[in-house]
Amino acid sequence: MSFINYSSREISCKIVYYGPGLCGKTTNLQYIYAKTNPEAKGKMISLATETDRTLFFDFLPLSLAEIRGFKTRFHLYTVPGQVFYDASRKLILKGVDGVVFVADSQIERMEANLESFDNLRTNLAEQGYDLAKVPFVVQYNKRDLPNVVPVDELRRALNIQGVPEYQAVAPTGVGVFDTLKAVAKLVLTELRKTG
Amino acid sequence: MNAQMVMYEDEFNQITQVCERLTREASAKVVFLVDKNGQLIASCGQTENLDTTSLASLTAGNIAATGGLAKLIGEKEFSILFHEGERDNLHITIVGGRVILVVIFDSRSSLGLVRLRVKKAGEELGRIFDGLLKKVEAPGAGSPFAEITDEDIDNLFSE
Ligand SMILES: Nc1nc2c(ncn2[C@@H]2O[C@H](COP(=O)(O)OP(=O)(O)OP(=O)(O)O)[C@@H](O)[C@H]2O)c(=O)[nH]1
Ligand SMILES: [Mg+2]
C-alpha cells in the first residue's frame, strides 16, 4: 500500500517482481540499478544464497521526479522464485501496490511459469487482493534464447486479462525499463482512482 | 485494497518529538520508525552515515520473517526483538500493531534502560498513530493525486 507523506512531501509505492526460479527477476533489478543515476537510486540489497539464488528478497529504492510537488519513490522487490520459498513470497507481497510477472520464455519452463502464476494469484487472494484489480504487467523474458515459446502462446497462458506485456532480454536491458514504466504508470493511475 | 498509509505535518512533528526524547532518555545512538511495509517514517540521532532506507526495508523484512515464525509455533507475533552486537545493539518493537520502532544503542546505555523508555514512547506513539488512522479514514481526506493527469505520469519518465 502506498505511503503518502505530507510532511516530507513524498509518496512511496511498492512494486514486486514475481515469477518462477531463474526467470530473471533479480537480473531486471540489477539492470535498473546499473542504468539509474546515482542520485535517483539507493543501495540495492540482495538477500541471496551462495549460488546467487534469491533467498528472501532483493530490494532497490528508486526516486523519480516530482508529481504535484510530491517526490515519487518506488521500492522494487523481487521474490525468491524457487517453489519451496513460498512462505517468504507471501511476506514480500504484503502491502504491494503493483506486480510484474516475469515469465521464462523457454519451452521447458512453461510448467514452472504456470505454477508460479497460480501461486501469485493464490498468495494475493490470501491477502485480500484480486489479481484482476492489482496494477499488473507481464514480461516475457529470455527472448534471446533459441528454444522459446511463441508470444501468442505465452499470452494465452499468462495474460488472458490483457494487461500490458513486454518481451525482454533482461541482461542486456531489452524491455526492462518498458516493463518498469508500465507498472509504475498503472500504480500512479490507481492512486488517482482511490484518491 | 488496504487503507492508505498517510503522514501529516502535525503528526510527523509529534512523532519526531517522541523519537527525539526517546533517543535522549534511552542514551541511544539512533531511533527510527518504519511501517510494516518497509517505508521509513521518521529517524533521529546519529543518522548521518546510516543508510536508513536499507535499514527500513531490512527491519520490515526481519519483522515479517519473525512474524511468520511466530505464527508457525502458534504465537500471534514476537513484539520485541533484540540483536546483540560487539559494539552496537538493536532493539525492535512493534507499536500499535502497525509500525516498528527501532533503537540502536551501545555500552553507554543498557537493555534495561532501553526497554523502560521504549515502553513509554511506544504508548505515546500508539496514541498518535491511532489518531492518524482516524484522520485518514475520515471522509473528505482527499489525496493530492486525485487530480493527476496522464501527462504528469508520462513526465516522470521523460529522462
Ligand atoms: N539468456 C538469458 N539469460 C537470462 C535472461 N534473464 C536472466 N538470465 C540469466 O538467468 C539466470 C537467473 O537469473 P536471475 O535474475 O538470478 O533469476 P531469478 O528470477 O532472480 O531467480 P530466483 O532468485 O531463484 O527466483 C542468470 O544467470 C541470468 O543471467 C535473459 O533474458 N536471457
Ligand atoms: Mg532472484
Image: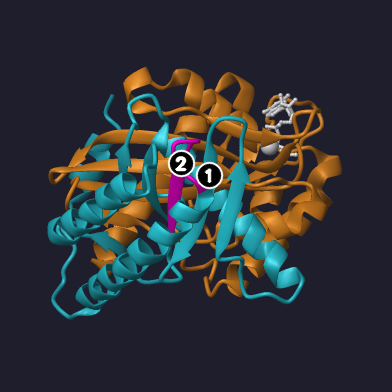
Chain colours: A orange, B cyan
Q: Which residue is at the front of the view, B34 or B119?
A: B119
Residue placed under numbered mark 2 in the picture? B104
Residue placed under numbered mark 1 in the picture? B90
**From where the camera sits, is residue A100 visible?**
no
SS class of the residue under badge 2?
strand
Q: Residue at x 63, y 40 (%)?
A: A140
Q: CA distance from mark 1 to mark 2?
A: 5 Å
Picture quadrant of ligand 1: top right
Q: Position of residue B109 (x, y in %)?
A: 45, 42
What's under tag 2, amino acid-wise? Ile
Q: In the figure, residue A66 lies in which quadrant? A: top left
Horizontal relation, residue B112 to residue A194: left or right: right
Q: Which residue is at the front of the view, A29 or A7?
A: A7
Mark 1: few/some/many CA within 10 Å (<14, 14-19, 20+): some
**From where the camera sits, is residue A22 visible?**
yes
SS class of the residue under badge 1?
strand
Is residue A174 magenta-colored? no
| Tag 1 subunit | B
| Residue A101, placed above or below residue B45 | below
Q: Position of residue A64 (x, y in %)?
A: 30, 34
Q: Is mark 2 within 8 Å of ligand 2?
A: no
Q: Which residue is at the front of the view, B87 or B61?
A: B87
| Tag 2 subunit | B
Q: Residue at x 49, y 44 (%)?
A: B57
**Contact, CB < 8 Å: mark 1 with mark 2?**
yes
Q: Position of residue A144 (x, y in %)?
A: 70, 24
What segment is highlighted magenta in the picture? Answer: B100-110
What's under tag 1, amino acid-wise? Leu
Q: Quadrant of the C terminus of chain A?
A: bottom left
Mark 2: few/some/many CA within 10 Å (<14, 14-19, 20+): many
Is residue B107 magenta-colored? yes
Q: Position of residue B151 (x, y in %)?
A: 19, 43
